[in-house]
Amino acid sequence: MGASVARAIRNFNLENRAEREISKMKPSLAPKHPSTQNLLREEMSRHPEIKGKIARKDDKLLSLLKSVYVDSKDPVPSMQDEKELLGSSGKRCAFDDIKATFDV
C-alpha cells in the first residue's frame, strides 16, 4: 500500500512539472575575459580558414565517433576492501561513525 501512495504522490501533476522544467531558461555561457576575446579576434583575422573549419563537420571524425563503444563494469571488491569496510564488531559502519584526523 505504501508503494502505491508514494507512486501517486510522485506522479501527481507530472506533465505540468516536466513542461515547467523544460521551458525554464537555460543558463547562458559566462562572458569571456576581454584579453581572451582580443586573442580570438586576432587569430581569426590572421587565419580566416579557421572559422570555416569550426563550422564544417568532419565526416572522418564523425565516423570514428560512431564506432566508439564503451562497455563499463564496476570492479569487483576484494576481500581486503570488504574487511576494511567492516568495523571491529563485524557490522558495516556508517559514515557518521568514521572520524578522521589529519596532521598538518
Image: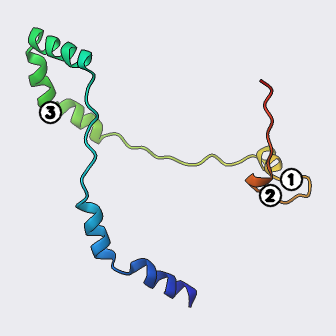
Q: Position of residue 10 (x, y in %)?
A: 44, 77
Instruction: Look at mark 1 in the image and give the residue it sits on.
Output: 87
| Element assignment for label 3 | loop
Q: Residues within 10 Å of mark 3 (few under 14, many from 20)?
A: few
For the residues labelled 1 and 2, say whether their Cβ atoms are less than 8 Å apart.
yes
* Marks 1 and 3, how far apart at CA: 56 Å
Between disc 1 and disc 3, the foreground one is 1
Q: Quadrant of residue 31?
A: top left
> Could you tell which of marks 1 and 2 lies nearer the N-terminus?
1
Residue type (three-letter) at the residue carrying disc 3: Lys
Q: Position of residue 37 (x, y in %)?
A: 20, 19
Q: Quadrant of residue 13?
A: bottom left
> Could you tell which of marks 1 and 3 lies nearer the N-terminus?
3
- Residue pictured at 22% horizontal, 61% vertical: 23
Instruction: Look at mark 3 in the image and give the residue it sits on.
Output: 57
Q: Is residue 10 above or below residue 94?
A: below
* Marks 1 and 2, how far apart at CA: 6 Å
* Marks 3 and 2, how far apart at CA: 53 Å
- Residue pictured at 25% horizontal, 15% vertical: 35
Instruction: Look at mark 2 in the image and give the residue it sits on.
Output: 92
